[in-house]
Image (cartoon, rainbow, N blue to C red):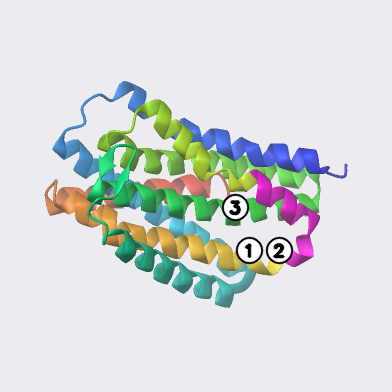
Amino acid sequence: MTPTLTQVFAAGLLPVLFTGLGVLPFIFIRDMNHRFMGLANAMAAGLMLGASLGLLLEGGKHNSNFALLGLMMGVGLVGYVHRKLNRYDNLTFQDVAAGDAAKMLLILSVMTAHSFAEGIGVGMSYGGGSRFGAMIALAIAVHKFPEGLAISLVLVPRGTPVWKAALWCMFTSLPLPLMSTLAFGAVLLFAPLLPLGLGLAAGGMTTMVFVELLPEALTSIPRRMAYVAMFMAVLAMIFFQFFIGL
């Protein structure tokens, strides 16, 4: 059956909902002490590193040179934004000031940019038919749950209410339905850009880990605990991506 634009748009909405589900653990977690925040940062760092590795490998399958170019662009772009945000001592976001606000804005920006590449992937997959496209959209949707968790691990411990964190998680995935329909309508135009976008997202998330999340974790918990938590989260994300076939 030939896919329609409505089908592709609906498939792009599914990952948006799954991203919002990433806040579910915080419905039951009430203790947001200093130690928990350190573990949260380390776990978010690991989830993002694992996701970055998966994105880079996927981009390399299509065009390794474009994927590496995107990686370098992502590193440079997020490094630049990080330096700019740190210049504003009076920066606020959701009633959170300065350094924490910068971290929250940075992760929201990076994860939103990431969704553009995923939307292109969904739209291009529907070029292979409704069944194949639906399978890819579902795989990406399931993959968005731990991404939503990674975002929540940065937002909720810094004072964002759970319901607002869910909305922000879904906001980062809003480019998906838009880009999926555009990419489906112009498969040949967007195909060369997919590995570039995947590499860009990987570079951005990796930079976010090493300039913000990991250093923050190391100020709150012992070094060994931070690295073990991050390593376990990396393994969990890699296993998860392998399990769902990404």
Asked whether the beta carbons under mark 1 and mark 2 sit within 8 Å of each other, the answer is yes
- Residue 178 among magenta residues: yes
User: Disc 2 marks which amino acid?
Assistant: Phe
What residue is rendered at 27% in x and 56% in y?
Answer: 212
Please provide percent x and percent y for residue 191: 71, 65
Please provide percent x and percent y for residue 64: 57, 74
User: Rounded to the nearest whole Å, what is the CA distance between mark 1 and mark 2?
Assistant: 7 Å
Q: Secondary structure at mark 2?
A: helix
Estimate how packed mark 2 is, as few (under 14), some (14 to 19) or many (20 or more) residues with alpha carbons within 10 Å: some
For label 2, the residue is 190
Quadrant of the image occupied by residue 174: top right
Estimate how packed mark 3 is, as few (under 14), some (14 to 19) or many (20 or more) residues with alpha carbons within 10 Å: many
Quadrant of the image occupied by residue 163: top left
Decide which of tag 3 and tag 1 comes sooner along the chain: 3
Residue 166 visible at all? yes
First to last magenta residue range: 177-189
Q: Observer-nearest residue: 32 or 108?
A: 108
What residue is rendered at 39% in x and 45% in y?
Answer: 236
Quadrant showing the N terminus: top right
Report the disc number at residue 118. Answer: 3
Left or right: 97 as drawn, with respect to 241: left
User: Disc 1 marks which amino acid?
Assistant: Leu
Q: Observer-nearest residue: 101 or 43?
A: 101
